[in-house]
Amino acid sequence: MRRVALCLLAHPDDAEILCAGTLVQLAARGWEIHIATATPGDCGSATLPAEQIAAIRRREAAESAALIGASYHCLELRDVNVVFDQESNRRAIDLFRRIAPALVFAHPRHDYMLDHEQTHLLARNASFSYPIPNAAAEPPLPDSRIPWLYYCDPLEGLDPYSGQPVAATTLVDITAEMPRKEAMLACHASQRQWLRSHHGMDEYLEAMRRHAVARGRDAGVPYAEAFVQHRGHAFPHTDLLAQELRIDR
């Protein structure tokens, strides 16, 4: 099995908020890590033009990934315009084809904004499709196969349609990894001002910590990240995260 993990999420900083602690653990166990976003975050400023803030956010994302020896990629779609269409789907499959991940992290089907939900569709379809020989122009890498697929929490761990907490299938203790998770998120300095302007929030790191504490209570540890494993037809059903990170049931 290729020890290659890819998270494909909508925006720069999503990985740091949702799954960076788990990525840190995988990197420490010898996994090759790739962090990808659908967009470069071009709407992530109330004052800067789109291309200027996009350049800043690409740089911040690359700096964050480098802290754990990971690579950063962007599909170069645009904020609030992510859609599951032929061109976007081709870009996602091409990315998967170049990386051939054995383990994928994606947004859940239901989340607070449609960029997340549409990126979910791109990641889910690419996971299923990229090993198919005719799915892309270039040949697949050796040992390309349908990967283990896990969905990160929606914002605040709540289903946006029901308002109810999402039940995790896998909880990862990230207590030891919190300092590096925080350092990765702190690389996204441009977002502090944006969140203050658009969301009325001046607690970028604190909001992340609160959710990690809440998931930690579910796991009986100080800090945790939560995932729901995709167990649809043809996808692996064993809990690779639990096995790889030696999570006791």
Image (spheres, rainbow, N blue to C red):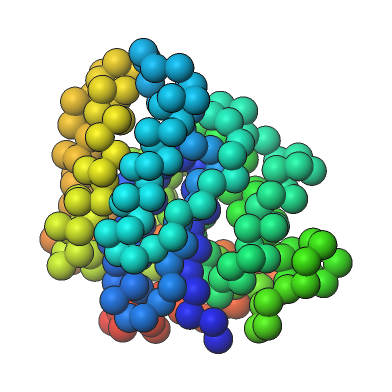
Residue 73 pos. (x, y %): 51, 52
Using the image as rendered, state which of residue 207 and residue 184 is in the foreground.
184
Count of labels shown? 0
Residue 119 pos. (x, y %): 59, 44
* Residue at far top of view: 47
Tell me: 145 left or right of 138: left
Identify which residue is drawn at 76% across, 42% down: 87
Identify which residue is drawn at 39% across, 17% down: 48
Tell me: 160 left or right of 171: right
Tell me: 27 left or right of 78: left
Identify which residue is drawn at 38% across, 33% down: 56
Identify which residue is drawn at 29% across, 72% down: 25
Can the viewer see residue 163?
Answer: no
Using the image as rendered, state which of residue 40 and residue 195 is in the foreground.
40
Image vertical order of residue 239 relative to residue 75, above or below: below
Residue 128 pos. (x, y %): 70, 65
Q: Residue 164, located in which quarter of the rendered image?
A: top left
**Quadrant location, the C terminus:** bottom left
* Residue at far bottom of view: 1
Using the image as rendered, state which of residue 167 and residue 106 is in the foreground.
106
Residue 203 pos. (x, y %): 18, 31
